[in-house]
Image (spheres, coloured by chain):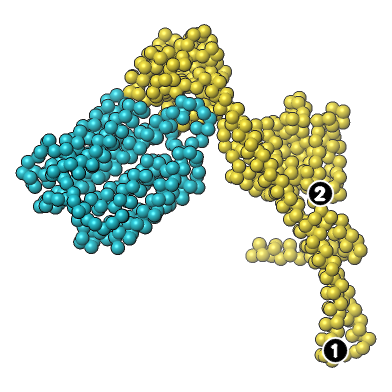
Chain colours: A cyan, B yellow
Amino acid sequence: MSLLWLRFALACYFIGLVYAFVALSRTSELFSRVALHAASLGMVFHFVSLTELFLSGHVVWASVHNGESLLAFFCMSFFMLIYVIYHTTSPGVVVFPVVFFLTFVAAVDEQPVLLTQYVSSKGWLAAHIFLIFIGYAALLVSFGASLLYLLQERRLKAKKSASLISFLPALEVIDQIGYRSLLLGFPFMTLGLLTGSVVAISTYGRLDFLDPKILLSLLMWVVYMVMVFTRWNSGWRGRRAAVLASFAFVAAIVAWAANYFSTIHRFAS
Amino acid sequence: MRFQLIGVNHKSAPLEIRERLAIPESRLPDTCRDLTAHPGIEEGMVISTCNRVEIVAHTTNGSADLRGFLHAYFHLTADELDAHLYEFRDKDAVRHLFRVASSLDSMVVGEAQILGQVKEAYATARAVGAVRSQLDQLFSRAFAVAKRVRSETAVGSSSVSIASVAVELAKKIFGTLEGKTVFIVGAGKMSELAARHLMAHGCASIFVSNRTYERAVGLAHRFNGQAIKFDDLYSSCDRADIVITSTGSPHAIFRREHGEQFLSRRKNRPMFFIDIAVPRDVAPDMAKLDGIFTYDIDDLQQAVSSHVADRRKEAELAEAIITAEVENFEARLHTLDVVPTIVSLQDHLETIRQAEIDRVRGRMGQLTPEQEIALEALTRGIINKVMHTPITTLKTAAKESEATTIVDVVRRLFNLHEKDKNENKEKTSPPDKKNEVGTRR
């Protein structure tokens, strides 16, 4: 049943996906409103799906599909939060495709893909997953914002008058969205990694720093920290911030992909 | 529909003429009263702005001497005035008014002020009783049309002056201008205007720098800002988010190295340079720096002219809306025109019928109920059959332009005019009395 709701959510997110592609070429007030409503409806279905999962008692914390679904939900929550504060749907250009992809993968089949290793400290594991996913979602939004920043900067510098009536919010607003998500995401990411370490230590007795998952996660965290620091210290934004954000984002994806190489963080069906 | 409109605008008359015709606001009520006192005018009102003076009237016979009114009122001869006047009647007058209210007849097409000015003129005329049912209908419709044009086309949405384009760009960069700082380099008229616009949109503080320090002080004083010595320009310029520069310097005064300094001192917060100097004050390679946005006079001008072109395109859409609305308005007025005629025609025949029945009763004495019913049915049937075609014709004619003629013919054939006047006198007085009683309670 939970899967069914998730598929409903997926259908709604599909509209968001279409919006993401259309918004890049032209501005339509109506369509962005439609996409917003579809996304909200999708979130309701998604929430029902997640709640049902938790209530059914079948929740498997370390299932990849449940994780993807949860991450997608956090990303959407961020998107909505931004909409509420800034009244712009433009981050959807980046958020919607990612959310759609995650939900799609999560909604495909019921085959549980589980952590191969039995974990005894369930509470820590749940905390790890929640925290790290909020961190991921914030990172995604920040990355998206830096892309939009570049886009808007280019339009302003190109001096085409059409650029004045674009779907993008003002440059400083985009910048603020990116910076605030970065700041918000950092503690979550840090705590997420710490709780992950706790889980690893309690399961394996030690932290294997040479394991690709841990190495890449650490790398991602370092890049994240550099981003926050350069921004705070010398106000890096625009191109440089975008490069860093892309770097952190790629590191995050690679860290995710490392699940397939890692010995301690491996999933199998 | 017996609307007439006469007037001058920025296209038809030079400023000297418009000045002489302009009516100050305080005198508008009196002018409206004088207008309605003029022979042939039932209702009238005056729109007087800096770009137009127009008189709109509803007349008794459709050809009131509005020119005569203007000549007498402004003490101008026909030679002085008539060449500059335009005059519209009926449908054309409606169309012109719709265009004026929708700002399609404005000097800057799409500007928003005119609608407010027309509304004020309407309110003034209404207050003195110069506007009643006919003009009331016309103007309510005109306001609705203006609203429709504004919401359905983008005719008023883009900026068409350099200063407003600058504000729009600044907003695209900074979002809100609240609390932003403006730096004027070189005290010129144009930079002052741009600064005024920016301040009006929320910019908080202003610095002024000029080679002649006294001029900087003067301008800073006017803006309640701070004057900066020209030597301190580079050391203080990074405090500004928006720099408006218009010096007469033959070389660029802001070069790439300055931009780099500013950015590092500002922690890379963006800066917006509005360069209205020729030759340019900001070196072209400044724009290559991340976070520095420079717009020179050509860029701004280009934005303005592309907006003007956009507006022209939108204005075409607006004209189509207006054409449709004029047709609608005309059709509705005609329908309203024929309804009273149909009603009074029916009343008229009913009176005849009743009178005839009474006569028959008098001659034949008491009738049986069956006979009463038969008599009723017979007379009603005849009247309905006879009336069927004229009423249908009237109703269909309402939608076409010949309505007025047919209505006139019917009214004259059945002598409805005189009757209506008598009846109206009787009808209007009693309800008034009732109202008075009602309010007293």
Kind of residue at disc 2: Arg
Name which residue lies at 64% across and 36% down: B313
* B232 relative position to B54: left or right: left
Compared with B297, A15 (above or below) is: below
Toward the viewer: A149 or B190? A149
The answer to which image quadrant residue B151 occupies is: top right
Toward the viewer: A254 or B143? A254
For mark 2, name the chain: B
Compared with A183, B181 (above or below) is: above
For mark 1, name the chain: B
The answer to which of marks 2 and 1 sits earlier in the sequence is 2
Name which residue lies at 31% across and 48% down: A102
* A223 relative position to B397: left or right: left
The residue that label 2 is drawn on is B2
User: Do circles 2 and 1 both sit on a common chain?
Assistant: yes
Toward the viewer: B304 or B180? B304
- The local secondary structure at tag 1 comes to helix
Q: Quadrant of the C terminus of chain B?
A: bottom right
Label 2, label 1: how far apart the Cα atoms are: 50 Å
* Residue B45 at least partly seen: no
**Of the numbered discs in the image, which one, if any, rests on residue B371?**
1
Q: Measured from the top left, where is residue B402 in percent x and y?
A: 84, 55
Name which residue lies at 20% across and 41% down: A258
